[in-house]
Image (tube, helix red, strand yellow):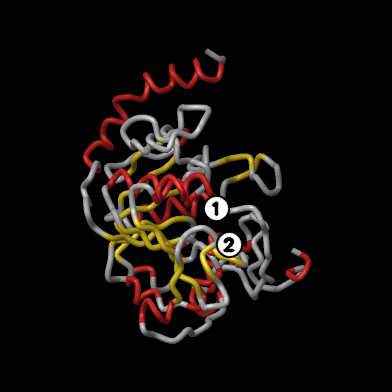
């Protein structure tokens, strides 16, 4: 057994009691449909109220959207390691500094305490609460059968893969992706909380391929696009209009997020493009 495997096994055994609390979510929504909502720039085109008809699993900074309350978000994933401590090594600046963005997430948890949050086990000493639940990979490889929130959870390779694993564990058999623009062809770039539009890219690499293929063995998965110019690169797609019967209505970040929150994002040292389109065409 490699040293990393041994370390993971020891950590797993030490965490069993903490993870066992997640067993209450097993097949809790068996046979139901849900939305997995990312942070892609396509959110700027959508009226989020149109996605309030199903349970949603949210992620990232979705909570800052003015219409967040119109969604039925019951679950939320934030998988950043060591994210809920006052200080951290910023992945963009590479500096050890005050964790401003983590503080924003913590405020969200306090404000939306009716939501169940799934976060990295590395944060177990940084935040606790009845609605806080921990997940961890434990293995050095991906196993498509291991989406056990109460044991070994190998669907951690980003927010989308983790949310897919959460949905599978809960028993959802129809999963619709919203704002997961990297699953499109051509690939749609940018985030809804950033200013402006970024150019699309045609790429041969399939985003989250192994996770989407594995999840598709257990559920029907599709992705919402803005127009017929985009299709799912690996999974079926449906346009916003075909799904909702509504027309697209583009809104800029300052129209869907409070100015005070945009200022906080701009000062978070996370290299977000909040107030200008500088170098967008070069990305």
Q: Residues within 10 Å of mark 1 (few under 14, many from 20)?
A: many
Mark 1 touches mark 2? (CB < 8 Å): yes
Looking at the image, residue 201 lies above or below residue 161 = below
Q: Give the residue at mark 1.
A: 101
Q: Quadrant of the C terminus?
A: bottom right
Label 2 crowd bin: few (<14), some (14–19), many (20+), radius 10 Å: many
Instruction: Identify which residue, 5 or 253, lies in the foreground.
Output: 5
Residue 69, quarter of picture: bottom left
The residue lying toward the viewer, choosing from 90 and 50, is 50
- In the rendered view, would you say 9 is above or below 107? above
Image point (29%, 65%), residue name: 72
Can you give x and y, in whole percent of width and height, for residue 107 in the image? 42, 55
Q: Residue at x 53, y 49 (%)?
A: 209
Query: Is 60 in front, or is 247?
Result: 247
Q: Residue 85: percent from the left, percent from the top?
A: 50, 40
Residue 227, disc: none
Q: Secondary structure at mark 2?
A: helix
Q: Quadrant of residue 279?
A: bottom right
Which numbered disc, 1 or 2, marks the residue that appears first in the sequence? 1
The correct choice, above or below, for 5 with respect to 272 in the image is above
Q: Could one spot residue 63 in this view of the protein?
A: no
Q: Residue furthest top?
A: 1
Along the horizontal axis of the image, is 110 left or right of 199?
left
Label 1 – label 2 distance at C-alpha: 7 Å
Q: Is residue 135 above or below residue 67?
A: above
Q: Nearer the viewer, residue 188 or 37?
A: 188
Residue 235 in view of the camera: yes
Instruction: From the top left corner, tell me how far across and down residue 132 is, in percent.
Output: 33, 43
């Amino acid at each position: 057994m490699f040293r990393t495997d041994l370390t993971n096994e020891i950590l797993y055994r030490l965490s069993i009691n903490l993870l066992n609390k997640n067993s209450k979510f097993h097949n809790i929504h068996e046979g139901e449909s849900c939305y997995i909502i990312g942070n892609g720039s396509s959110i700027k085109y959508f009226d989020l109220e149109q996605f309030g008809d199903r349970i949603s699993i949210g992620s990232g900074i979705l909570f800052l959207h003015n219409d967040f309350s119109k969604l039925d978000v019951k679950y939320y994933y934030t998988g950043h390691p060591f994210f809920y401590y006052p200080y951290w090594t910023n992945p963009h600046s590479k500096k050890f500094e005050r964790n401003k963005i983590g503080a924003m997430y913590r405020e969200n948890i306090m404000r939306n305490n009716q939501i169940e949050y799934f976060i990295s086990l590395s944060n177990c000493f940084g935040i606790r609460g009845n609605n806080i639940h921990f997940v961890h990979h434990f293995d050095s490889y991906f196993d498509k059968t291991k989406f056990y929130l109460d044991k070994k959870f190998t669907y951690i390779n980003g927010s989308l893969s983790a949310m897919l694993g959460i949905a599978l564990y809960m028993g959802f058999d129809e999963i619709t992706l919203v704002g997961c623009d990297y699953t499109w062809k051509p690939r749609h770039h940018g985030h809804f909380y950033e200013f402006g539009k970024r150019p699309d890219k045609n790429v041969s690499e399939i985003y989250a391929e192994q996770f989407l293929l594995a999840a598709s063995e257990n559920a029907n998965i599709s992705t919402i696009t803005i127009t017929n110019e985009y299709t799912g690169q690996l999974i079926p797609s449906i346009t916003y209009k075909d799904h909702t019967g509504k027309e697209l209505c583009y809104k800029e970040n300052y129209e869907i997020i409070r100015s005070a929150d945009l200022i906080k994002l701009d000062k978070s040292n996370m290299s977000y493009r909040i107030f200008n389109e500088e170098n967008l065409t070069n990305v």
